[in-house]
Image (spheres, coloured by chain):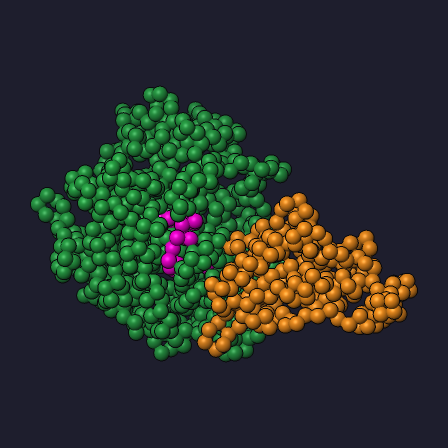
Amino acid sequence: MREKAILVDISKCIACRGCQVACKQWNKLSAESTKNRGSYENPPALSENTLTRIIFQEVSDGKNLKWFFRKEQCMHCSKAACLELCPSDAIYKNQFGSIMLDSRKCIGCGVCEKFCPFHIPRINHTTHKAIKCSLCNDRVANGMQPACVKTCPTGALKFGFRDDILSSAHSKMNKSKKMYLYGENELGGLHIIYLLTQSPAIFNLPKHPTIPNPFEAYAFLMEKLNSELLNQNVLTIAALKYFGHIHA
Amino acid sequence: MTNHWIDIKNSDCILIIGSNAAENHPISFKWVTKAMEEGAKLIVVDPRFTRSASQADIYAMLRSGTDIAFIGGMINYVLQNNLYHKEYITEYTNASFLVDSNFKGPRDLDGLFAGYDSKARRYDKTTWKYQNNMDGIPIKDKSLKNPNSVFQLLKSHYSSYDLDTVCKITGTPKDIYLKVCKTYAATGKIGKSGTILYAMGATQHTNGTQNIRSYSILQLLLGNMGIAGGGINALRGENNVQGSTDQGLLFHLLTGYLKSPISKDVSLAKYLERVTPSTKDPLSANWWSNTPKYVVSLLKAWYGDAATKENDFGFNYLPKNSGGNYSHIALFEAMYAEKIKGLMCWGQNPVVGGPNSNMEQKALQKLDWLVAIDLFETETSIFWKAPGVNSQSIKTEVFLLPAASSVEKEGTASNSGRWVQWRYKAVDPPGNAKSDAEIISRIMLKLKDMYSNGTGSAAEIIRKITWPYGEHPDMDQVAKEINGYDLSTGKLMSTFAQLKDDGSTSSGTWIYCGSYTEDGKMTARRELDDPSGIGLYPKWSWSWPLNRRIIYNRASVDLNGKPWDSKHAVIIWDQSNKKWVGDVPDGGWPPIAIDREKTKLPFIMQSDGVGHLFGPGLTDGPFAEFYEPWESPVKNLMSENQNNPIIILWKSEMDHQGSPDQYPIVATTYRVTEHWQTGGMTRNLTWLNELMPEMFIELSEELAIEKKIRGGDKVIIESARGTVEGVAIVTKRFQPFKINEKIVHQIGLPWHWGFAGLSKGHIANRLTPHVGDANTTIPEYKAFLCNLRKA
């Protein structure tokens, strides 16, 4: 199966935030109670009720002002930290290459939230389950586009086969030398491909995102075990998962 | 729009001024980005760096209310550097026409035009006319050298709009301003196009109409009217506001932009004589000469069999204006003065949306009754329990009629591009909510019942109105009436060209004639063919007039009927078949050079057939002249006349003008993507409130330092009329203006909030004045003075 991806061309994003609302509508997520913090940006971070949002950034070199809008959501990494570190095997990859979360298996341990190099998944503190963007698997599996892409008025978001998305990104880069590509090779290749107008660092995207050391995840789980009485079994399974291959 | 939304993609240069298209018309950027992919340049002119500006190749800041100086300087740049489209202006505009030699302009009369009567505060326009020859046809000098030619007068008028003066007025940095001039003037080259997108940032000024006039002059000079990717394009702020003006919403117009009768029009003949323009030039089609056919067909639609030749087709059933101004401000002044005792407020929320809204809220308290018709409770429907109001002291009886939303009713909506699109009902309205059509029909049926035995003129008029709709109007029946019938056969009309002035045809809105014919409901068409290749989609819905997608399209070709821009041909003359191919042409006459006898000039809605560089139709001058807004922190650098001399003022005890000593900061109001108008709908949606939760005020970092304000602080804005509180957004997107060596600060605030709904906040229009444009009386919302402090 050819993998699917979203192209986020930030040179075309006008921050209408139709994507933010469409995501909530499709996924039946509640509005958050927010405040104006001296900016247009809201909510201030992803949460159990906000799976995608636009980050607003004003950048000035003293003469020229730029106002950047970057859509933040799960990157659907080919080598996904959450998938590799989840102690309950609740995270898996579907036929489109999207990273999925099986909430029946999720134990709410918080490893994915803590160790995602992009800090995307969140734990819903009512249900004690992790939640994140599924790339609208329920829509895509039925031949539709993700809700955010469907609603985008300017063509800043495009959905398609990952190889097609990459070649259209490359052809745009060839036309306009000032663009930067992010997501082609990072973590084995992301399924959110950014066309950026500045270097990724300006957008706070890690230059070389990596999967954290499993020791850290193990230590995190040990701490959780003491404070929240996670099942001892979880720790054993995690140890096997993290370190099993060393002993094998 | 002279053009339409999709057509933006054909443009080589898009100038957004007086509009924040990306925020308020996000879908426009579908086409702006497509144009930019093909190499188009985007220029955004705005007091503040907006979401539109974030996409621009050039962002130019200008102080609110200085648009005419800005565009005037561009006109001057085009003229001084010979960048205009010479053949276009010579053949298709009045550039070559000679003007009355007694005409004088602001350069001779220190800011005034000839004929100013300072007592009456109006112009006598006697000299604002052409010199005619013995046959009554305007005399032309196609060399454009005669000092009395429109071209030379235009050149002299705008000669003082030089780079230095313009930038001193607008506060635009000179290098950026020059870049704008150069980039936009490049569209004057044959085969290039430039479009102007504007909205309320252009119109809501005491010079609002002349702001748009300045665009017309610039666009005509560059040959940008009638072509693909060109035009003057008003982005309408509500989905069917185009439809409502088409259908006679404005007080000075009947449907289809026919003029309202006035008390001097004692008979149909007198009225028609006054409103029907004439020409002696055989080359001018003078389309409005058909006015009698449209008026009589309208009267037949409204009064049916009661409209007979003997009774002037019921002309005297129409109300006549006895000289009053019935615009929004005037009506609220009259309520305040207790001259108007009842109000039906239909989908409108003046307590939030009206200017000087403290006063408008007070005016509602003086009414005997108020009917509000809306989806939700609005600030207007609950004005009697506004903060600080003692409900017990208010005697106004208030009714709230719940209305159906757009998806809960059937009918058409006309978009900015004049497409009239049929929409189907998706769901039933909740509870007792009713469609507007049902509400008005039931009121009318009740009136007819109540007046059935009455005497007097009102009773007769109400009895005579054709009202076949019943309690549950069939929208197809209404749409057919708007289209019109051949009354002898009972068949639907297919074009307004066949309407008659003898009572044998009807048409509720002549410009919609052809929208619902014997071939079917054109507005419901959804075919995706585009034979033009430029996105005309002639079988997708229907656009007025006659399904023409780009109006004045005969100016898109040269004298032989060959498109100026062959890559984006709107129409082409097919000589072998002797007809136009492409869009529906503005009349089928052959091109000028093909047949000089049978041809007609392209601007058929002007009585002289040409585009107006010299426009004597407005009340305040044939050329756009710059004046400061009613409230301004500086003196007018163009002349001693500080304000447009004939702006309309009111003087109740609640109408105050602020002085710059007390209120040194310029302010403007605007909208954000996330909320809509007065927030009546959007502030009741939690997903939108999450995005834009609170009333805010945007200010520059420099002003914030001066006033010791940090982002997120609560601040108070004060004008001569009221006080507003909001959260400070301190941003580089506002920069202080350097106006004639003086630093002038500007702030901005959205006008979406009020005290009703789920997200509550202060009402920005507490600050804005009751002062109107000289032509339309549109309120000056977009430039006024204030001061601010930390709360």
Q: Residue at x 29, y 59 (%)?
A: B188
Viewer-closest of B376 and B407: B407
Residue B202 percent location from the top left of the image: 39, 58
Question: Measuring 35% from the left and 23% from the top, which residue is drawn there?
Answer: B487
Check residue B749 for magenta coloring.
no
User: Which residue ends up furthest to the top in the rendered image?
Assistant: B489
In x, y percent, where is residue B91?
A: 20, 51
Q: Quadrant of residue A135?
A: bottom right
* Colour applied to chain A: orange
Q: x, y percentage for residue B765? A: 48, 59
The stretch in magenta equals B1-21
Residue lying at 51% horizontally and 60% vertically, measured from the top left: A171
Classify B626 as above or below B7.
below
Chain with colour green in the figure = B
- Left or right: B524 as drawn, with respect to B567: right
Residue at image coords 31%, 63%: B185
Q: Is residue B13 magenta?
A: yes
Q: Position of residue A6 (x, y in %)?
A: 61, 56
